[in-house]
Amino acid sequence: MTIERTLSIIKPDATERNITGLIVARLEGAGLRVVAQKRVWWKKKQAEEFYEMHKKRDFFDELVQFMISGPIVVQVLEGEDAIKRNRLVMGATNPVDADPGTIRKDFAVNLQRNSVHGSDSPESAKREIDLLFKKSEIVG
Ligand code: RTP
Ligand code: MG
């Protein structure tokens, strides 16, 4: 059993609809613990740096504009197999393809406004956590 940490973001479409608590309840219900959390409103540069791996994708500019359109909640989640576990409870990127009972099936608006982000590998989890949190902000 591996206790892991992963980086989660509650996106602007969810803060706008005031459903961050409903989403946190789903994460906790899936066995994940919020060990760090803050509400921020990114500047363009921060969104571009976070999503740097998507720079060449045709949706990059739209994604950055969306992610700076309102406040977000960034979190470190801890738990057994946290990275995979979080991706499972999030559901598929496009809510149309997401399984019943997942966050995206129940809350996402569309492919872009899909309510949550979750790190997709141990390497990206480390990069994303180090980018957004100081060590002292994470309390396990
Ligand atoms: P995330 O990174 O947010 O956890 O989502 P993901 O791994 O499921 O999806 P990814 O391929 O990494 O894409 C990042 C985010 O970009 C937006 N997107 N828009 N218009 C489009 O074709 C498109 N494709 C992706 C989504 O907000 C997606 O979560
Ligand atoms: Mg991704």
Image (tube, grey):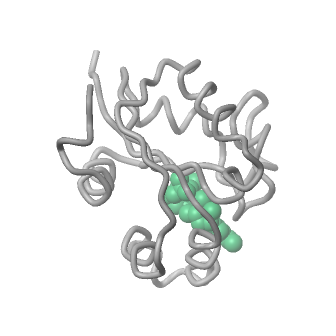
Rendered position, 140 above or below 90: above
Residue 31: image location, x then y, percent: 49, 18
Rendered position, 8 above or below 86: below
The extreme top residue here reads 1
Q: Quadrant of ligand 1?
A: bottom right
Residue 50: image location, x then y, percent: 39, 68
Q: Residue at 54% across / 80% down in the picture? A: 57
**Of the pair 79 and 45, the residue shown nearer to us:** 45
Residue 49, by quadrant, is: bottom left
The C terminus - image quarter: top left
3 left or right, relative to 34: left
Q: Residue at 57% across / 33% down in the picture? A: 88
Rendered position, 106 above or below 59: above
Residue 13, by quadrant, is: bottom right
Residue 73: image location, x then y, percent: 52, 50
**Of the pair 59 and 75, the residue shown nearer to us:** 75
**Of the pair 94 and 46, the residue shown nearer to us:** 46
The N terminus - image quarter: top left
Q: Residue at 46% across / 73% down in the picture? A: 47
39 left or right, relative to 83: right
Residue 46: image location, x then y, percent: 40, 74
